[in-house]
């Protein structure tokens, strides 16, 4: 009798194991929950979870329950490699939906590509061809955001000389180069280029040098609380005419910087930050679908990064459904077939040659009025 | 090439930051003087000072002076808890100084995570103590907050000097540092002294945090750079005297500002660590003690 029970239990376990594994679709996320990217990547992580809960409520992705595996890369490339390796070898994730630490995603992209695991990213795409083959970006191309800022200067001010102030992350370095291109497009001269470290507590020296070079505006590139510090430094140096133009950051530092500099602080805003700026009906419906759920759970917290994560999960859902499989290469191929997907943050168009999904500039210029983010008129 | 006004402006910027490094450095010295322990959680007290003060201001709408007065004892209490819960048990069980130092580092990480979970990840700030400014002196901008940092820094250095040289408690603290066993035999309550040193050190860190936050931001993760720079300031100053730590901080702050101006931001830490290396090589006991020895040997 005992033997029969043991055999039956062993049989049940043998059957239950594979069924359980096949039922779950594991999505890995290497995110900077601590360090300079924490604010953005926590938003990305929460957006992923919100979407996972929503999809699981609908029965999962193509019948598979979504399981998120989140690892903190501490906003550090070396830690990111460890996090990716752990998720590949221990957790056996089937796709990555990783955060905005571009250096970390770059560092791990080679290994991820060799493992034939698709990766959708909050960051820019890695640089090598074989890595780009497996990566899909949900971040608007950096040039859009810069063009929005330069267009504002050209159309609304007499300022024709600017200074760039960026952190040394790959994303910010890329944007700093693109800022020079965008400036030229709008007849604006870059007269100073300064950098700062993400943990710097004072940027007065850099701000002073930009001012001394004759710049009328600072194009600030980089995420984290540095925007507020720079705003304070501008004020402390008594630069009453200097404009500070930021972008791709969270609403909280924007509000704080706005309180310091008033109408001398502006930023390239996302649709989530200023929903009233969205007029297209399809875009508004997609934005509302996300915002309703986001606000119910997180209140007034900025959902910019979360909206991109939400979109990434919905696109993964579409791709798996299209592929009728969770197999990495098949999902990757299907991702290339996702065209005209209107998400909460932007409109996405992927193709074999287009792995940057956002092809239309979704930004508007924003400012802070009475503690709220509003579109610059 | 930068002109004279820019150069002076950079010096002013460096002095502002250097004073804060110095205040953090004093915190290192106070605990070291009492116990021989280097408290690597010193930077976290700076963070807690800014975060708790900002929270009191935002959530309860307190005036800045009241928020600051409440913040300092709260952070001092956290320092006491750290001493009682982490340092004292290890000290009592005869753990090596290295193990205790490592435990202070672990405490920093723990306190950062607790802050993250309780107060969130958003950066915070509050207004300068004196609105308006800056004061323009021949084209050089001097923020009003710098005067607060200067004034409070001078008060703290003076107060600590008086405390360590003119009071029984201060002398007892110094005696514990020189020989804890002998101090104990003389009736000095060594354990209580160590607790006092953590409270004092945490309070100093909190004051530094309250003073610097109006000039920038505070967040759960800003403690490490302040801790590292404060540690360097303390070493330059000889790891013992409050005045030495402030002078070390000033030297470091000015060097960092000049490194950014002449070499670029990426060289800021290179400059700081190069100075530290030179100090350790030439004056292992700190610049001021080293110069004193040098002068004495020439006589």
Image (spheres, coloured by chain):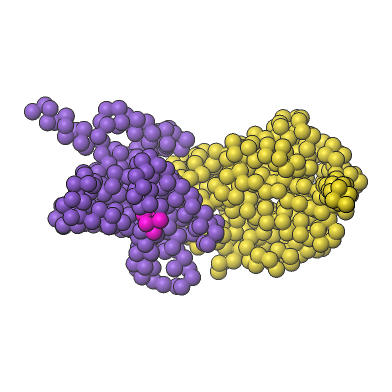
Chain colours: A yellow, B purple
Q: Is residue B170 left or right of residue A79?
A: left
- Residue at the spot 72% in from the left edge and 45% down from the top edge: A28
What range is drawn magenta here?
A: B81-85
Can you give x and y, in whole percent of width and height, for residue A309 in the image? 72, 52
Quick one: which residue is furthest to the front in this view?
A1
Task: Pick the residue in front: A337 or A13.
Answer: A13
Quick one: which residue is furthest to the left in this view?
B299
- Residue at the spot 26% in from the left edge and 49% down from the top edge: B34
Can you give x and y, in whole percent of width and height, for residue B96 in the image? 36, 41
Q: Is residue B178 left or right of residue B81?
A: left
- Where does the C terminus of chain A fall, quadrant-wise? bottom right
Residue A162 on the magenta span = no
Q: Height in image: A276 above or below A305? A: below
Q: Is residue A14 left or right of residue A39?
A: right
Can you give x and y, in whole percent of width and height, for residue A55 in the image? 81, 58
Q: In which image quadrant can residue B148 be found? A: bottom left
Q: Can I make out residue A284 in this image?
A: no
- Residue at the spot 19% in from the left edge and 33% down from the top edge: B291
Can you give x and y, in whole percent of width and height, for residue B6 in the image? 36, 42
């Amino acid at each position: 009798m005992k033997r029969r029970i043991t055999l039956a239990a062993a049989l049940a376990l043998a059957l239950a194991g594979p069924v359980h594994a096949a039922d779950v679709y594991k999505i890995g996320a290497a995110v900077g929950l601590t360090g300079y990217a924490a604010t953005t990547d926590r938003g990305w992580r929460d957006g992923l979870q919100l979407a996972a809960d929503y999809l699981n409520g609908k029965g999962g992705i193509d019948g598979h329950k979504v399981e998120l595996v989140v690892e903190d890369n501490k906003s550090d490339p070396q830690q990111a490699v460890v996090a990716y390796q752990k998720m590949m070898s221990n957790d056996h994730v089937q796709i990555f939906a990783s955060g905005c630490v571009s250096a970390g995603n770059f560092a791990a992209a080679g290994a991820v590509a060799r493992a034939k695991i698709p990766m959708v990213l909050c960051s820019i795409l890695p640089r090598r061809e074989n890595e780009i083959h497996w990566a899909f970006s949900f971040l608007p191309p950096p040039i859009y955001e810069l063009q929005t800022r330069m267009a504002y200067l050209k159309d609304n001010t007499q300022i024709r000389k600017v200074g760039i102030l960026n952190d040394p992350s790959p994303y910010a370095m890329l944007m700093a180069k693109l800022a020079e291109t965008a400036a030229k497009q709008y007849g604006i001269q870059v007269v100073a280029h300064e950098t700062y470290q993400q943990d710097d507590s004072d940027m007065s020296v850099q701000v002073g040098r930009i001012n001394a070079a004759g710049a009328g505006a600072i194009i600030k590139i980089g995420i984290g609380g540095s925007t507020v510090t720079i705003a304070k430094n501008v004020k402390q140096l008594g630069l009453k005419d200097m404009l500070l133009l930021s972008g791709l950051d969270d609403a909280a530092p924007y509000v704080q910087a706005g309180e310091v500099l008033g109408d001398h602080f502006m930023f390239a805003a996302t649709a989530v930050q200023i929903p009233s700026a969205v007029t297209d009906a399809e875009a508004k419906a997609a934005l509302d679908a996300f915002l309703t759920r986001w606000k119910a759970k997180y209140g007034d917290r900025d959902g910019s990064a979360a909206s991109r994560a939400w979109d990434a999960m919905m696109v993964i859902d579409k791709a798996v459904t299209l592929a009728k499989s969770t197999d990495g290469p098949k999902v990757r191929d299907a991702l290339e077939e996702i065209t005209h997907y209107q998400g909460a943050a932007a409109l996405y168009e992927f193709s074999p040659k287009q792995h940057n999904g956002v092809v239309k500039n979704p930004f508007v210029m924003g400012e802070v009025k009475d503690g709220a983010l509003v579109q610059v008129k | 090439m930068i002109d004279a006004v820019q150069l002076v402006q950079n010096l002013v910027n460096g002095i502002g930051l250097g004073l804060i490094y110095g205040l953090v450095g004093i915190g290192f010295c106070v605990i070291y003087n009492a116990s021989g322990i280097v408290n690597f959680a010193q930077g976290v007290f700076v963070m807690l000072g800014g975060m708790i003060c900002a929270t009191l201001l935002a959530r309860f709408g307190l005036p800045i002076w009241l928020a600051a007065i409440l913040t300092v004892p709260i952070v001092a209490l956290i320092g006491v808890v750290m001493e009682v819960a982490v340092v004292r048990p290890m000290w009592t069980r005869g753990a090596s100084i290295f193990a205790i130092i490592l435990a202070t580092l672990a405490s920093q990480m723990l306190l950062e995570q607790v802050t993250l979970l309780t107060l969130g990840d958003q950066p915070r700030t509050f207004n300068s103590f004196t609105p308006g400014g800056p004061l323009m002196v021949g084209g050089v901008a001097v923020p009003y907050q710098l005067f607060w940092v200067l004034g409070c820094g001078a008060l703290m250095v003076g107060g600590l000097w008086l405390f360590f040289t003119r009071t029984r408690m201060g002398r007892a603290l110094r005696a514990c540092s020189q020989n804890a066993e002998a101090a104990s035999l003389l009736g000095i309550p060594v354990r209580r002294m160590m607790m006092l040193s953590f409270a004092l050190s945490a309070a100093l860190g909190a004051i530094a945090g309250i003073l610097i936050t109006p000039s920038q931001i505070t967040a759960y993760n800003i403690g490490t750079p302040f801790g590292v720079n404060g540690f360097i300031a303390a070493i330059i100053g000889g790891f013992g005297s409050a005045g030495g730590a402030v002078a070390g901080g000033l030297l470091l702050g000015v060097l960092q500002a000049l490194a950014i101006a002449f070499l670029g931001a990426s060289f800021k830490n290179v400059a700081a660590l190069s100075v530290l290396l030179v100090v350790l090589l030439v004056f292992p006991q700190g610049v001021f003690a080293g110069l004193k020895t040098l002068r004495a040997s020439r006589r």
